[in-house]
Amino acid sequence: MALLSAGGPRHGWFANAYLLLCLTTLFWAGNAIAGKLAAGVLTPVTLTFLRWLVASVLILIIAAPHLRRDLSTLRRHWLLVFGLGALGFAAFNLLLYGALNHTTAINVTIEQSAMPVFVMLVNFLAFGQRIRALQVLGVAATVAGVMITATRGDPGSLLALDINRGDAIMMGAVALYSGYTVALRFKPAVHWLSLLFAMAASALVFSIPFFVVEVARGGFTAPSLTGWLIVLYTAVFPSVMSQLFFMRGVELIGSNRASLSINLVPIFGSLLAVVLLDEAFRAYHLMGLLLVLGGITLAERYRVRA
């Protein structure tokens, strides 16, 4: 059942899928910038653990009344909820922050646009959802844009398996989040705050063993002021606001169409990276972005509702 039947409003800004998904991608782009700023300040494990610790506390404060009502339902679906939180929230960000230690924020944000490929393929294979020819062409354009970005404008390097380590890690993160996107259709019918807290808590639990190992090995360093500011940003905006808005967007227009909005991440991410990180925007980035935007246009215009 949908979030609407569980208490989501039917009118107003929270019913505007495109506004919600636009904000989602802006905050996600900011997550990549924060992850890049964290390199050398916080390890990927520390940032992931502290992010979901803070986010869980924040959500619990406002979700408590709904949790009391939804607890029995969440218990019945605990394995699904844990899997969604562990993979979509924690594992994805562990990989993303790890990738940013080896590649640029521009590359990471552009590569996230591969998600619709995985989403559409899984929906087609698992649920028989039809994909139109021009939609496939749009996806192909998106893939081409991602490949040009990941190979620094030299797709031939794929034949030699000469791909930057960070870009390869990011593609693994993309695959994980795509699976999460499709699996959202099975979420239990509870209030959105209850679900968000359960998934955030699951992400926290999943990240604890990694954090314990890091501390035991002497890899943990207490965050500086800059580190805590990064933690707070990632806890509030990508962790709480983006996840809520994305779940709502998937509900309103389906996972195929909602996943296409992720292709806005490279637009926001590239702009933020150039302005805030002083990263170079090269010709192959422009080519990749143009292909991504063309793919979005085709796939959205000739969409099939998921």
Image (cartoon, grey):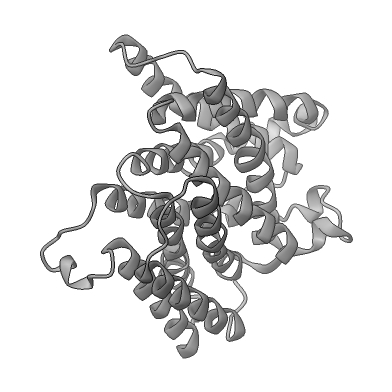
Residue 75's image quarter? top right
Q: How many marks?
A: 0
Q: Is residue 292 left or right of residue 102?
A: right
Q: Give the residue displayed 63% in from the left and 46% down from the top.
A: 243
Residue 132 visible, this angle: no
Q: Give the residue displayed 58% in from the left and 36% down from the top.
A: 234
Residue projecting furthest to the bottom: 133
**Percent from the top left, x then y, of residue 117?**
42, 69
Image: 242 above or below 2: above
**Percent from the top left, x then y, of residue 132?**
50, 87
Residue projecting furthest to the right: 11
**Percent from the top left, x then y, of residue 73?**
68, 36
Residue 258 visible, this angle: yes
Which of the pair 192/296 is nearer the observer? 296
Which of the pair 273/148 is nearer the observer? 273
Residue projecting furthest to the left: 160
Residue 241's image quarter? top right
Q: Give the residue displayed 37% in from the left and 41% down from the top.
A: 95
**Percent from the top left, x then y, of residue 268?**
57, 58
Residue 200's image quarter? top right
